[in-house]
Image (cartoon, rainbow, N blue to C red):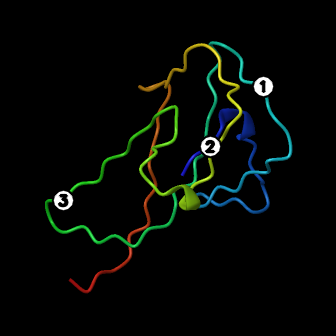
Amino acid sequence: GWLRASRRELDPHQSTPDQPVHLHERDLPVESQKVYELNVEMWASSTTYLAGESLRLIVQGCDIATYPNILTRHETEQVNQGYHKIWTGADHKSHLLLPIIGSKF
């Protein structure tokens, strides 16, 4: 999934803890040195992980261009300026919520 920080506003009626729904009605300013909570929808997947396997989460400031163009929407307007920081630690806790579905393996 991906999310532009200026489009972080959630729809309070449709969003759930495991499915954030963004309004995309207006751009909200992103001010320097201010911390914002971003709820990014992770695209659905039906991946089976076997014992000992792991999952990697990559956070980056641009699209991963490994998919055919027909499968992705490319942003042509570059509006980002300056440096981007990801705040972590005791005061800025993050989490990844993954649904676990029973397996037949």
Whether residue 18 is visible to the viewer of this picture, yes or no, is no
Mark 2 and 1 residues: CB-CB less than 8 Å, in contact?
no
Residue 22: image location, x then y, percent? 73, 51
- Residue 27 vs residue 71, the one in the foreground: 71
Residue assigned mark 2: 3
Residue 43: image location, x then y, percent? 52, 60
Label number found at residue 53? 3
Crowding at dot 3, Cα within 10 Å, few <14 / some 14-19 / many 20+, comes out as few
Residue 99: image location, x then y, percent? 44, 66
Mark 1 and 3 residues: CB-CB less than 8 Å, in contact?
no
Give the structural element (helix, strand or loop) at label 1: loop
Mark 2 and 3 residues: CB-CB less than 8 Å, in contact?
no
Q: Residue at x 70, y 56 (%)?
A: 21
Crowding at dot 1, Cα within 10 Å, few <14 / some 14-19 / many 20+, comes out as few
Give the structural element (helix, strand or loop) at label 3: loop
For residue 4, what is the image quadrant? top right
Q: Is residue 23 above or below residue 75?
A: below
Which dot, 2 or 3, sits closer to the camera?
A: 2
Q: Residue at x 57, y 46 (%)?
A: 2
Q: Earlier in the sequence, mark 2 or mark 1?
A: 2
For residue 88, what is the image quadrant? top left
Q: Is residue 58 above or below residue 96?
A: above
Label number found at residue 29? 1
Q: Residue at x 41, y 25 (%)?
A: 89
Q: Earlier in the sequence, mark 2 or mark 3?
A: 2
Look at label 3 and name its amino acid: Glu
* Left or right, residue 78 beside residue 41: right
* Left or right, residue 39 beside residue 30: left
Look at label 1 and name its amino acid: Pro
Q: How many marks?
A: 3
Residue 51: image location, x then y, percent? 15, 66
